[in-house]
Image (cartoon, grey):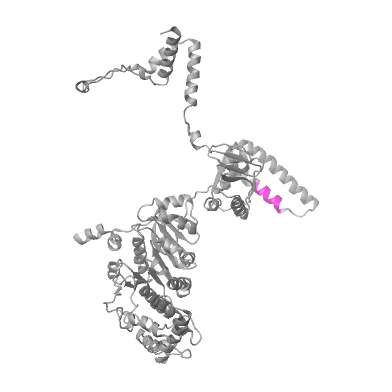
Amino acid sequence: MSEEKQKKTGLIHTVLSFLNLEPSTTKKETTLTPKDEKTSVDTATPKATPQTREKKNSTLTKEERTELAKAEQTYKAGLTSIRHIIAPDSMELKSDKVTVSGMHGKSFFVYNYPRFIESNWLGNIINMATTMDVSMFIYPIDSAKIMKFLRNKVAQLSAQIHLNQEKGIVRDPALDAAYQDAEQLRDDLQRGTEKFFHYALYYTVYSEDEKELQTEAKKVQNTLGGKLVLSKPANFQMEHALNSTLPLGLDELGIYRNMNTSPLSSSFPFTSSELTSNDGILYGINRHNDGLVIFDRFSLPNANSVIFATSGAGKSFAIKLEILRSLMLGTDVIVIDPENEYQNLCEAVGGSYLNVSLSSDERINPFDLPNDETNVKKRGDILRTNIITLTGMLKLMLGTISPTEDALLDRALIDTYALKGITLETDNPHTMEVPTMGDLYNVLANITGAEQLAEKIKKYTKGTFAGLFNQPTNIDLSTGMVVFCIRDLEETLRPIAMYIIINYIWNKVRSKLKKRMLVVDEAWIMMQNEDSAKFMFGLVKRARKYYLGVTTITQDVEDFIKSPYGKPIVTNSAMQLLLKQSPAAVDPLAEVFHLTEGEKYMLLNSGVGQGLFFAGNKHVAIQIIASFSEKNLVTTNPEDILSAQAA
């Protein structure tokens, strides 16, 4: 081996030793036979220790150390750093915006604040459904320097006030306010209850579309402006403004405002939300601060609520707790139970459990008329309203009908009531005997052109489904809790049964004003048909007038939201509970409820009984909790039920 080659080889060994690496040639190459395989020994040269490397470095010449430093730099230049991973693939700077990897951004700085502002004023901006970065820079200032400045400032203000008085100039309120503020700040700084700071606030709004960027930026700017917090775009300084809002801790704009401790603390945007009142029931624990979520749904503009959750997330558990605790406060509860989940609770509180099926004894006559004492109407309005409701129910039963058949059906319904002496001119029609589905069949059978409608209705009067909707009503809603179980009904009859039951409940609710809750479990069944969905929406919209709170529960979020009446039901419900969601359902919910990315992530990763609780304009992260006795009574977990039965 030549001397030059030996020198290069030695340098390579030195570099690799410095980097804690060894070349593959330092191992002796041996060929192992099968019998030698177990007893083979690694004869590799041991790694160099720090002491060995230090000794080797001390023996290097100046030229070798220079070569070693260059080799180290070359090696490090080939390593992938974090900056390489997170760096954007492109960036374009303009005077009024910046484009990063196709995402448009616009940066702003805040330059003026009002004299008074509420705490957590920045919370509304943080919770907006807008992609943005917000950065705050706080610089502490030596109080001694500020005290000296304030002393001079107070002297100037005092002199100006006395000068105006001597000249007979009308008192200037702004001058007096500045003098009082300066004196108050001097006192607080002297006592140590306040400190002085420089405060800078910047934000950058992002959007994939340029027009949407302008809209979102204007929305944020106007929201701040509504609080008299004024901001401007950092034109011709977009690069510096962007760097100032990135999580680098760099303030390259240096546009700040003098603030003492009290107003500065009000800008902290992550104060815990509170949702506790003196009245109401316990819904759970506030996960932000471990406080209690106590609320009265009837104190809201309306008492309606919606619950969205995936299967097994705890929605039935949550609503049963609400029912149990509401009953203690004298609220009547009516439940439509599609899966026989509320029987144990109903029996425990002494309620009425009604199993609605083809073989059961409980019957509801859809032709019943309400005694609407809570709302005085003109003569004939009660009958007219009930005929419209019956038309929607019959469309569910008969399927699609033509306009001619619709007119024949309306005529037949009027004639059916007339057979019992009930017309649009009858006073107090609810006191008279009402017809049944069989009477409607007889009327249709005698109307020319309505023979096909009569044949379709015959199935419900003399055919397979006879008896369920063709008998006088024999149930009562006088007990505190009433449950209608429709589990044993055929799938085709469930939407019809829910429609008739809800209409019957609605008639009873209008008859007497009382605080009530109506729980519609698996409400997506009602959303599958336009007429039933429309009826459900009308019920939710009018419930407030009759002291009724409607709770709609569903796990099929997409079917519910896609219905033209699904979203209006949500917007007409002042209280909402979102529990654990599936990835397919979280995006439609985020669009309806304007959830942030953090809230979406929380719903996807929530445990059983965890989620978001909305009440009016407030919302908190909630954990549903129950006592030992309550849990044993309301649980739907099969393991808990079997354990209780075994005990």
To which quarter of the image does residue 234 belong? top right
Examine the image and state in which quarter residue 107 appears: top right
Q: Is residue 635 above or below residue 416?
A: above
Residue 174 belongs to the span the image colors magenta:
yes
Residue positioned most to the right: 167
Rendered residue at 31%/82% (across/down): 474
Between 275 and 477, the residue placed more toward the observer is: 477
Asked if residue 93 lies in the magenta stretch, the reply is no
Q: Nearer the viewer, residue 17 or 406?
A: 406
Q: Is residue 267 above or below residue 145?
A: below
Residue 512, position as x, y percentages in the image: 42, 79
User: In terms of image quadrants, where is residue 43?
Assistant: top left
Q: Is residue 206 left or right of residue 21?
A: right
Q: Decide which of 251, 367 is in the foreground and name it.
A: 367
Magenta residues span: 173-181
- The relative height of residue 32 versus residue 246 in the rendered view (above or below) is above
- Most common SS among magenta residues: helix
Q: Is residue 282 visible?
A: yes
* Residue 287 visible to the viewer: no
Which quadrant is the N terminus positioned in?
Answer: top left
In x, y percent, where is residue 63? 50, 11
* Residue drawn at point x = 69 percent, y = 40 percent: 152
How far across and down, in percent of the image, does residue 49 sit?
37, 18
Q: How many marks?
A: 0
- Place of residue 435 in the rendered image (x, y in percent of width and height, measured from the top left): 37, 87
Quarter containing the C terminus: bottom left
Residue shown at 47%/31% (left/top)? 80
Name the one closer to the observer, 241 or 18. 18
